[in-house]
Amino acid sequence: TVPPQNMANISTLIGGTVKDILVLEGTFVNKGKVLATIQNLEVVEMQEDYNSAVANIEYLQLEYNRQKTLTDENVNPRKVLQEVKSKLAVERARAKAAKNKLQALNMSTSGSSLVPIVSPISGYVGKISIAKGAFAETGITLFEVVDNSQMHLDLNVYEKDLESISVGQTIDFILTNQGNKSIKGKIFGINKSFSNESKTVAVHAKINPADSKDLISGMYVSANINIKNATVPALPKDA
């Protein structure tokens, strides 16, 4: 398996029609890569809100400066200055809110109505759950991206064997579906709770990155944990 931070289920924060899908399953993508684009005219309204607020801020700032000068010279009452200051604060808050919405959607403050769906991590594209022209809903996984560089091993150990297990022990394991190729690992963590279904405890082991490049999350293995060294009487194989 891979750590949670190395696996991403990618969805959209705003619904829309899928315009383009820019990747294929099994391809490697870098963090920030655009995987698809979604068309939604609501983002145009967000851009208009932002640009309108910016224009109002520019005008109100000039008006505020003018009113401040008049107030300092006791020409205008301070109430007028406070009204302009209040309007200026409202427009700044509106501009900030619109900009934050656009940034959350990875959108610029002007231009296209196409919302990019970007990968939050580098890794391989797994399942693609959308099609061009379909409607992408919020909260639904559109892409899966997996980074296999931090692949580790999860072993299910029974209660009777736990006393013999400790962090730092080495593991030899074989893939049950790949010609019994042997790979080594080292235990780095032991869960402190039982699995309700199997009544076992999960033991986690690191794998050398060079050995894990061909592994896929979800593969089954058979493993031997090297518990301790012992000196015993023995004979050569030829005897």
Image: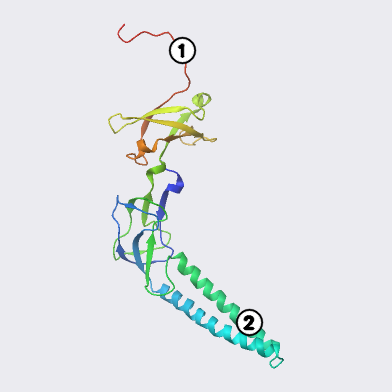
89, above or below 8, in the image:
below
- Side of 5 where 36 appears, left or right: left
User: How far from the left and from the top, in percent, is residue 109?
Assistant: 44, 73
The vertical placement of 199 against 2, above or below, is above
Q: Is residue 172 above or below residue 147?
A: above
Helix, strand or loop under label 2: helix
Label 1: how many residues lie within 10 Å, few (<14), some (14-19) or many (20+)? Answer: few
Q: Quadrant of the N terminus?
A: top left
Q: Which mark is residue 231?
A: 1
Query: Residue drawn at (42%, 28%), measured in percent from left and top?
Result: 171
Q: Looking at the image, which residue sits at the far bottom?
A: 75
- Local SS, label 1: loop
**Residue 175 place in picture, x, y as percent:** 33, 32
- On screen, residue 34 versus residue 95, left or right, reads left
The residue lying toward the viewer, choosing from 164 and 52, is 52
Q: Are marks 1 and 2 in contact (CB under 8 Å)?
A: no
Q: Residue furthest right?
A: 74
The amino acid beneath tag 2 is Lys
Residue lying farthest to the top in this orientation: 239
Pointer 2: residues within 10 angstroms few (<14), some, or many (20+)?
A: some
Quadrant of the image containing the C terminus? top left
Q: Which residue lies at the image location 49% right of the left edge and 72% below the top edge?
A: 98
- Mark 1 and mark 2 lie on one chain; the one further toward the N terminus is 2
Could you tell me residue 206's position as x and y percent? 44, 35
Q: How many marks?
A: 2
Query: Marks 1 and 2, Cα distance to the nearest angstrom?
Result: 85 Å
- Residue type at the position of mark 1: Thr
Q: At 66% across and 84% down in the image, what residue appears?
A: 82
Provide the residue designation for mark 2: 85
Q: Quadrant of residue 131?
A: bottom left
